[in-house]
Amino acid sequence: MASAGDVQFGGQMEKTKERNEAKEGREEGGMEFSACGACGQGWGGDRVEFLGRERYDKGAYLFLPSYVMRIHGAKQQRDAVKRTPKNQLDPVFEALDTLGNTKWRVNKRVLGVIDRIWASGGGLADLVDREDLPLPEEPDTDDEAEIKKWKWKVRALKKENSERHSQRCDIELKLAVARKMKDEDGFFYPHNLDFRGRAYPMHPYLNHLGSDLCRGILEFTEGRPLGKSGLHWMKIHMANLYAGGVDKLSYDGRIAFTENHLDDIFDSADRPLEGRRWWLGAEDPFQCLATCINLAEALRSSCPETTISHMPVHQDGSCNGLQHYAALGRDKLGAAAVNLVAGDKPADVYSGIAARVLDIMRRDAQNDPATDPNVLRARLLINQVDRKLVKQTVMTSVYGVTYIGARDQIKKRLKERCAIEDDTELFAASCYAAKTTLIALGEMFEAARSIMNWLGDCAKVIALENEPVRWITPIGLPVVQPYRKLGRYMIKTFSQVLTLQRETDKVESLLSSDLCFVNFMSVNVMVKRQRTAFPPNFVHSLDGSHMMMTAVACKEAGLNFAGVHDSYWTHACDVDKMNRILRERSLLNFTRNPFWKICWRAFKKHSLH
C-alpha cells in the first residue's frame, strides 16, 4: 500500500507532466496560451453530456453554478424568470437542452491546414499576419505638414498593430482549444440565454457562433449518409460559402457553379496549400475547404449517396429582422424583398438597397456643384456602391442603428478599399453615403419603419410611468428591459469621495459616522434607452423563440441541430426536413401569438390605446 508521501510524490509528478503539456501552447506577444489551461477553465467543450435544465439556476454543469440567463445586475429580469411557473419555462429548458446535447468534434484535416498557415506566418484565409507593420522613421524636416502627416501615419499603424495583437491572441486561444480537443471522441456546448431569449454557447473562443476559423474546425460527431438529397444540398452549400454573388443564383445555378469547379474542388481537397488554392477565394475559406474535402470524398466514391458526412449545412435567414417586421405588418412588398414569398431565385435585399442608393447618387451627381455640396461626393462614391458597402447598415437598421453608427460602418468599408485617402474627405463621403442609405431604407421598408416607430412610441409612454417595458415571448420567456438608472451612493471621507451604485427599487439614506454620509438618487428607468432599444429587442426575442421552437421540433424529428440566431444547421441529408420544420415554426411563432396579442400582453398594464 502506498504511503502518503508516495501519493504526494505521484501527484506532483502528474502536475509536472501537466505543466510540460501546457508548454505546447504557443507564445504570442508575451502571452503563453496553454491548451490545458484553456480547456481546464471551461473554455473548451464538455466531454460528457450535461444535466438537463431543472430551474433558473440549476442545469448544464455538473458542479459549477449555471444560470439559464445572462442577467448580471438585472434584478427585475431575474425576479421575473424566478416567478414564472416551471411549466411555462419547460419549452425554454427543453430547447436549451436540445442545443447543448448536439455532439461536436474537431475536423483534423482543416485544423492541420490552419496550423500550417499559422506556423508560416499567417496572412492567408482571413488569418491575421503574425508580424507587426513597421513604423516609418521620423522625417528629417522642419515642414510641419510633413511632420503632421508622419504622426498621423504612425498613430494609424500603432492602432493597426494593436488590433493585430488582439487578433493574434484570439486565434492562439482558439487553436489551443482545438489542439487539445482534436483527439476527443466528441464534446458538447451547453447553452444559456441573454435577456431577450437568444441562445449562446457557454464556452467562449472555440464554438460554432465564432468566426469562419471556428466553423471550419467544428463538425458534428455523428455522421450520416448523404443520400441523393444530401449531395444536392452539399453542392448548394459550397456555392453559398463561396459567395461573391454566386449565393444569389437559383438553386440550379448554384449547383451548376459547383459542378463547373469540380477540378478546383478536388485540387483544394488534395493540395490545399500547394495547389491552385481555389478555396482561398471564398468568402468563408475554411468552411469552403471543409466542404471541398467532404464533397471530393463523396464524388470520388463508387456511390456518392452512401458517403458519410459530418458537415453541418446552413440555412440562413435573409435579413431576419426585416423578415419579422414584414410578417408582423403583413407587408407584401417587404416580404418579397426578404424571401418570405417564393421565387425562382433568392431576392437580395442588400443589392436592392445598393441599387436604390446608386440611383440617388446618380441623380445628385447631375446637380450643380456650386449649389449642392453633395455633388462631388456622389461622383466620388458612384463606383464604390455595392451590396457589401451597405450590407451592415441594412442588417442593423432594424436593430436601431443610428446615423452615426451607419456612418462609421460605411467609413470602415471605404477605408478597407483605400477608396479615399484624405481622412477629411473620407469622413464627409461616409456621412453622405450613410444619409443616402438610410433614405433608401426608409423608402423600401416604410412599413417596417412605421412598426419600429410605433413600438418606440409605446415604450416611451410606458417608461414615462417609471416602468420598464415587459413582454412574454412566443415560447413563454418573460423579458424585462434592464435599462434603469442605478441607485447612487456618494460616500465622503477625509481623503476621497466614493460613488457606489446598486440596482434597487428603494434607496435609503444611511449615516454611519460623523466622518462620512450617504447621499442618494432615486431609481428610475432610462426613458430614451427603453424607447430606442425596444424595437430591436422585441425582434431579437422573436428570433430566439423561433430558433428554440425549431430546435425542439428537429429533435423530435430525429435531426441533429445547431443554431446561430437566424442560421439553422443540420446534416446535408436532413436539410429538406429542417426547411419544412423551420417554416412551420415560423408560422406558429406569429399565429400562436399574433402581433396585436403580444403587444396587448406587454402594454395592457399601462393604459395604452
Image (cartoon, grey):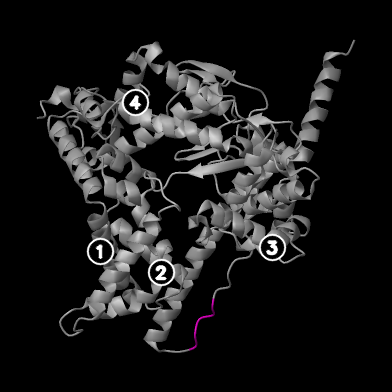
> Which quadrant holds the N terminus?
top right
Which is nearer the N-term, disc 1 or disc 2?
A: 2
Counting from the top left corner in percent of width and height, residue 88 is at: 37, 15
User: x, y percentage for residue 433?
Assistant: 30, 67
Q: Quick one: 482 or 283, which is closer to the camera?
A: 283
The label on residue 435 is: 1
* Mark 1 → mark 3, Cα distance in angstroms: 41 Å
Q: Crowding at label 1, few (<14), some or many (≥20) Cα neighbours within 10 Å?
A: some
Q: Nearer the viewer, residue 508 or 389?
A: 389
- Any mark on residue 94, and which? none
C-alpha span from label 2 to label 3: 27 Å
Magenta: main secondary structure equals: loop
In magenta segment, residue 231 = no
Q: Mark 3 falls on what kind of element?
A: loop
Q: Quadrant of residue 513?
A: top left
**Image point (42%, 30%), residue name:** 584
Estimate the x, y position of residue 531 in percent, counting from the top left: 21, 40
3D distance between C-alphas at marks 3 and 4: 49 Å
Above or below for 484 versus 360: above
* Mark with earlier residue (1, 4): 1
Give the amino acid at mark 2.
Leu
Magenta region, residue range: 136-140
Residue 414 visible from this viewpoint: yes
Left or right? Give the position of 131 relative to 525. right
**Above or below — where is 273 with respect to 58?**
below
Question: Mark 3 = which residue?
Answer: 121
- Dot 1 or dot 3: first in sequence order is 3
- Is 137 in the magenta? yes
Residue 414 tag number:
2
Q: Residues within 10 Å of mark 3 (few under 14, many from 20)?
A: few
Query: Where does label 4 land, which residue?
Result: 474
